[in-house]
Amino acid sequence: MGRLNDKVAVITGSARGIGKEIALYMAREGADIVLDDLNAGELEDTCREIKDLGRRAVLSNADISTRAGAAALIRTALDAFDKVDILVNNAGVPSRSTLMNVTEEEWDSVHRVDLKGVFLCTQAVATHMMEKKSGKIINISSTTGLNGTTGAIAYAAAKAGVNQFTQSSAKELGPYGINVNAIAPGRVITEMTRMGRNPQEVEIAIASRAAAAALKRTGIPRDIANLAVFLASDESSFISGQIIACDGGRMDRM
Ligand SMILES: NC(=O)c1ccc[n+]([C@@H]2O[C@H](COP(=O)([O-])OP(=O)(O)OC[C@H]3O[C@@H](n4cnc5c(N)ncnc54)[C@H](O)[C@@H]3O)[C@@H](O)[C@H]2O)c1
């Protein structure tokens, strides 16, 4: 008996990396999955892997940073399964710019996906979850949204916004039986770790975060998926409005 039997989960940015791992793990725990990503090719691979696990899976290529895209994603889910129990707002894009070199265009494009996309998908699913008086919303934030960082100011500010959005929407949606929480990963090795960095910079990025963690390693997508499944399951029914760091115990945070 899986921990998510008969649940329907919508997971944004699920073609690869953390989103894909969450989708596969939720499927292993018995959930049917609605996958969404702009990367159609890799998303089809994820879809096949979920079907191989014996679960149902539906694909969407909506851009969650637009109102129309977020609405289309939730409509796809409701058309296919008649309900949404779990929304994981995972899609995200990085930025590697400092305060003094970030452009207005980069600021806006990062905020459009990393913060506005979370708002749009949450708003699109909320009416349905409020009507059925249950739901689990999990936002994938970042420890940079808790502590700040150097060289990713637009991203850190967007993720700090996700944290506050999580707490505010938990307060508004709690009376309807909806839990809203955020996971704040530390560095997790995915394509995002490599984007905008040369191989040497990638090595430094991985080693420096491992050294800064009490557990002396960087994360893997499964670390985040374990926590996401817990937050989606009945086991976490009394937890809401939390920003849970999953970062190996970053010592500058503790
Ligand atoms: N990897 C890390 O170290 C790390 C650390 C902290 C937080 N995070 C967060 O975890 C989440 C997943 O990151 P990842 O490392 O797996 O990155 P990734 O780049 O491997 O995956 C992100 C996915 O989101 C998709 N996406 C981007 N914009 C989209 C849009 N507008 N609509 C639909 N899909 C879109 C991409 O196509 C991609 O497949 C992100 O929110 C990221 O900010 C990652």
Image (cartoon, grey):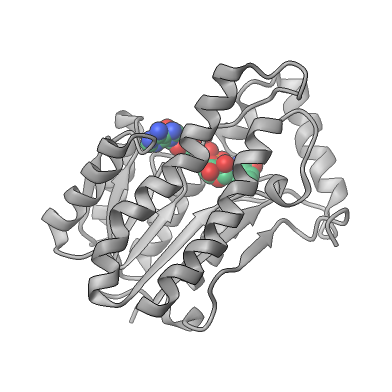
Indicate left or right for 113 with 243 as reference.
left
Query: What is the x, y in percent for residue 31?
Result: 30, 66
> In this rendering, is residue 133 above or below 139?
below
* Res 189 visible: no
Relative image position of residue 10 (x, y in whole percent): 32, 55
Q: Position of residue 14 (x, y in %)?
A: 39, 44
- Identify the residue shown where x is 85% and y is 59%: 214
> Split into 4 quadrants, where in the image is the N terminus?
bottom left
Compared across the picture, whether 73 is left or right of 93 comes to left
Front position in the image: 32 or 10: 10
Side of 138 relative to 107 (left or right): left
| Quadrant where the C terminus is found in the figure | bottom right
Q: Does the rendering let one see residue 154?
A: yes
Residue at image position (27%, 46%) is 47
Q: Nearer the viewer, residue 167 or 189?
A: 167
**x and y percentages locating residue 171 in the rendered image:** 50, 71
**Residue at coordinates 87% horizontally, 57% vertically from top-left?**
251
Q: Is residue 210 above or below residue 234?
A: above
Query: On the picture, is 35 further left or further right than 95?
Result: left
Between residue 61 and residue 55, name the one nearer to us: 61
Q: Quadrant of residue 4?
A: bottom left
